[in-house]
Image: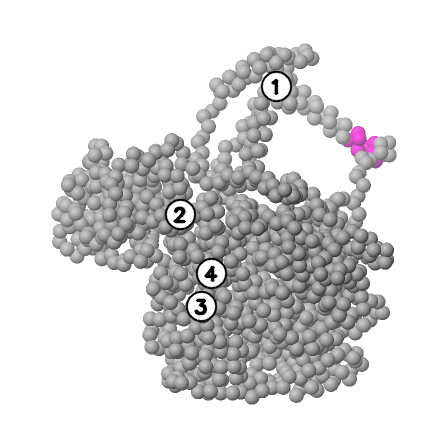
Amino acid sequence: MSSSRDFQKRLEALNREPLPQRKKSDGEMEDIRRRIRKLREENRPPQPIHYSRDLPRREPREEGPSVPAGPPVLLEDAAAGVEVDAPRGGKAYLVTERLDGRGQDWAALCKTFHDELLTQGSGMQRRLSALLDMDRLRLEDVLFMDLETTGLAGTPLFLIGTMVWEDGSLTVRQYLARDYSEERAVISIFLDGVAARKLLVSFNGKSFDLPYVRVRAAANRIPFAVSAAHFDLLHECRRVWRRVLPDCRLQTLESRICGRVRHSDIAGSEIPEAYHAFVRTGNAVQMVQILEHNRLDLATLAELMVKLPA
Amino acid sequence: MKFRAFLNEVRSSPDYRDQVVYVREAEGRKARFADLQRPLHPAVEAALRGRGIGRLYCHQAEAIDRIRAGENVLVVTGTASGKSLCYVVPILEMLLSDPEAKALLLFPTKALSQDQFKGFRAALDAADMSDVLAGVFDGDTPSNMRRKLRDHGSVIFSNPDMLHAALMPQHGRWADFLARLRLLVVDEVHVFSGIFGSNAAHLFRRFFRVCRQYGSDPQIVACSATSGNPLELAEGVTGKKMALVDDDGSPRGRRTFVWWNPPRTRATAWRSRRSANVEAHELMAMLVQRDVPTITFSKAKMTAEMIHRYVCETLRQAAPHLVSKVTPYRGGYLAQERREIERRLFNGELLGVSTTRALELGIDVGGLDASILVGYPGTLASFFQQSGRAGRQDRDALVVLLGLDTSINQYVMTHPEYIFGRPIEHGVIDPDNPFVVTGHLRCATHELPLDDAETATFGPHAEMVLRVLEGNLKVKRIRDRWYHAASETPQHEVSLRDYADANVVIEDVDTGAVLGEVNKFDAPPILHPGAIYMHLGDTYEVQDLDLEKNIATVKRVEVDYYTQPLGGTDVHHVDLRLREKAFGTGMAYWGEVTAYFDTAMYEKVHFYSLDAISRHGVELPTFVLETMALWIVPPEDLMERVRQADLDAHSGLRGIGYATRMLLPLFMTCDTLDFSHSIGSANSAWNAIFIYERYPHGLGFTEKAYERLHEVMPAVLDNIRKCPCEDGCPCCVGKPLRQYAVWNVERGEASIPSKASATMILAGLLGDGTELDKPDAHSLTDSEADDGLRLEMALRRRLERMREAQVFHPIEPRVETGYPDAEKEERLSSADVARRAERRRTFHRELRKRIAKSISTGELPPHAAREAPPPGMKSRGSNKPPTHFPGRPALREEKPSAEGEPPPEKKPIRAGDSLAAKARRLRKERMEDSDH
């Protein structure tokens, strides 16, 4: 009501005379409204975009537990992979991807990585040799890792992403538990994988990833023994960029150091709920996002490693 | 000896003549010692010698022998009989033989674990084992200490709540500790009764399940104060077979029990005696001035604070140097405050402490000699615990029981044999209640996947509960196991102590300090706006109670009154009649009802004089409880006869309800506090006597009572008839308190239900006693499947009502975020528009001025105000009983038809469709409609 009165006032002001006291017919009003709307739309400044994950998360969820968005997709269709048997029984789902198959930039990264680590006397080479207490580091001895879990405190994990050098390229191997019962297989395959390598590279793995795997291994009664040396990139990056960057989160490093910005990435806080929804419904729409998120995290690890100054 | 002199002095003083109504001297007894089968390790023996212990009492020797033999042991002996030694010695020996071994000790309160830890630390030092890492792991432990204890601790003192909320969700991090756990000590097992015990029983099942996962099977040592069925309770709670050690060999000093009844000051029937609080503080001040360490137990936190205040004021006049030697102590204080008071008590720096039940359990508060109980504590077990606080070892002790001016207290005053000649109450647990199981099954699946064999250990309803939880998206069955399938940590949502969802934090508005925490169900009566909250003897006025954020803000004020809530509980309506039968000349029913608890108003009461200053209404939400009830409807012609006999029929019905409630524990293992009673409801006969359970959907007590009604009701009649009182007392027809009474019982403004009327109704109802044991005329629960279905529906409803969003404390300020500014109105800057607006403003200003002027000169009458509400009331009509309940919009009686027609089908509840979501959807639809 008030808006129509305001409108009338404005028209009176524009016309410099009072409007005749009669009710406009609906058609006329509609016409006027349309014109006003059009005028407004033409002059409106672009609205800033606010992402939901930036807002405080205190409010209750709008509608029950989240259901995967988009049309239902089967995991096998969305992410080509194979079922693998764990040495201690059980099965897990393995998704493999070669980085150099992703495009030129990634192939270049593989090459840089290869050169940086194998060049005798490069900063990284010396640093790692000292850490490992051996002269020459073989690329096959390096294993990158990154976890995706259903929480922060001892709840099951469901994805262990690893990256190794294989046939001239960095290759991402992701072990996924398709439901809660496959966690045991995922952990035991991963631990066997670690046992075969000499160097483990992670981001904050010393205080998060590896202890997490240890706790989950204990809960699943899997013996936990990791003898590989651990190169934690968080500590290295902190040492170098602490005073330069606002913080040393992986996203910050990725955008500021590697110059890469992610599009349509899934927020870390949405991952547990997305996984529960996947187990519940079998719809793998969000799992594709999670796998991609994990893959990019791993690739960033390799890139940070080559970009670290000596 | 000195107490006898003191008593004689008191008795001969004219002020206190005739106040001591009963004295009983319990003789002391000699210590009995025994030797161990295998001598103690030399280091342990040295440690005991260091603490002045030469020989072991016979119960200690027996317990240690049995523990060494690997048995699960339950020690049941009196207060201060050296129970803790029974587990301290085995722990020391265990650590000496295997430094890697671990022990976990659980005490029901934080204070107790702190206290026991101090003793254990001393023992470790004396045994030259200072390198053993032992510590208290509770909510007050800083996080670095927690990590240290978790990774390297050998002996951990904790409480069940901490085990439940901190250790269990993260058991993986405790893997080393759990794998090497050899001994689990559970102290004060007798408090694991009722809802807490039922929860604890599940907690221990879950804990042993996790221990098995890590390959350990800890031995249990439990300690308990004397109770009716300690072994049954301990075995029920821990789920393990135990060996009982109860041959108490400790010495005991002479103990003098004094029944002290405040004098009558008025000749009225009620409120004729002096205030027991006033008597208590005088007595306490007297004892403190004689250097007798004294502890005073009151029933309410408020009373404890008040007595402390009175004592301080008395001492300030008589002996100012002693004022700093008395202190209050109660639950709700912050940890540091409590630790400090305990330390000062133990070191003998304090001479007097005014407390509530918080100090009842076995905290070693050192050499207290006198214990004053303000009012009978309600149960015998409590009475002996509180009186046992005075008199350690063979020192003489004085116990004074002060009679309050209520019937039950006056009954105890005149019938001391009630205390000394009765078996102690039984502890009861019902872990199979599906509503108790629900939370624990969520926790159990979160901890480890649950297979079918393990599911069976959680009771007969476990599988049904899991199916319902699966529908609620909390768990999921994959192949043959149940897995937790949600993001939250269920342990943080399940409380062991009660069924309230959360605690209310009390915050000082001036300093921002948190003064304490109160269970949400208890908050409205004591923290309603306007209430006076007492903390450390200071008075605070409650400004606001926010039950959404669970926070109450209080402001320090200096007032000379306290507040007393007035409210009650009642059955609002019957939801479902599940069974009915003819009973005597009337009818009996059993079914689901909706009851409510509320606080309608409060009263300001002057300190000391206890004069009521004023009454005020409060507007607080009503707590709704869906529960099971049994109701009896006497025939209408009988009620007519009662009225013709000039008796109050309603009063008689109330009396029957009370009497039945009091007698039910004789027929089944339950507590009188598990029930409430009320008369009539919105959709039942006006004279229906309701007995309903105070837990959501009950613990099964009322159905058992319904089945045994033919035994219960004749016993009730017999009990009322045989009671020696003239017209009613708390031992037969009840307490004088009536729900929604706007009268103050402490001042005697109430009446006891009519005994004559109750007897007449009951006799008429029972008739000749032949028509009592009839089969059900109608039953909706004839098969177990139906029963399961009903429980399942009820469980679904309850889960639906659970709050989705949880707000945890402390509440942080909202994060400032950059919401876009609201779009500004486009303003036209045309000159004449601005001028017109300016003119309009001026006009209105002038108009206002003119009106104001004319009012002051009397030309215009002032604006007619609404009629003011009566003094003290916020608004009119605020005290009406609620007309609707959340979740139950329509009131209709679901009456089963006689043809056995199935009850109308309820609309299935969609998964994830909570009430809040429904409301949001409706609101959205409505908004869309209005848009169109």
The quarter of the image holding the N terminus of chain B is bottom right
Q: How far apart are marks 3 and 4 (CA)?
A: 13 Å
Q: Mark 1: which secondary structure?
A: helix
Q: Residue B477 carries which label?
A: 2
Given contact means CB atoms under 8 Å apart, are the residues at marks 3 and 1 in contact?
A: no
Specify whether B912 is left or right of A20: left
Residue type marked 1: Phe
For residue B368, above or below residue B493: below
Disc 3 marks which residue? B240
For the residue pair A53 and B98, the one nearer the viewer reads as B98
- Comparing marks 3 and 1, which lies closer to the viewer? 3
- Discs 3, 4: same chain: yes
Is residue B851 on the magenta stretch?
yes
Q: Is residue B504 visible?
A: no
The figure's colour scheme reads one colour
Disc 4 marks which residue? B203
Residue at image location 72% in from the left, 26% down from the top? B842
Magenta extent: B849-856
- Discs 1, 2: same chain: no
Given contact means CB atoms under 8 Å apart, are the residues at marks 3 and 4 in contact?
A: no
- Discs 4, 1: same chain: no
For the residue pair A174 and B728, the one nearer the viewer reads as B728
For the residue pair A96 and B772, the one nearer the viewer reads as B772
Give residue A232's position: percent from left, percent from top.
Answer: 27, 51
Q: Distance between the residues labelled 3 and 2?
A: 29 Å
Disc 1 marks which residue? A7
Q: Tag 4: Cα neighbours inside 10 Å, few (<14), some, or many (≥20)?
A: many
Residue at image location 75% in from the left, 60% down from the top? B767
For the residue pair B494 and A51, the one nearer the viewer reads as B494
Give residue B351's position: percent from left, percent from top.
Answer: 62, 77
Specify whether A96 is left or right of B874: left
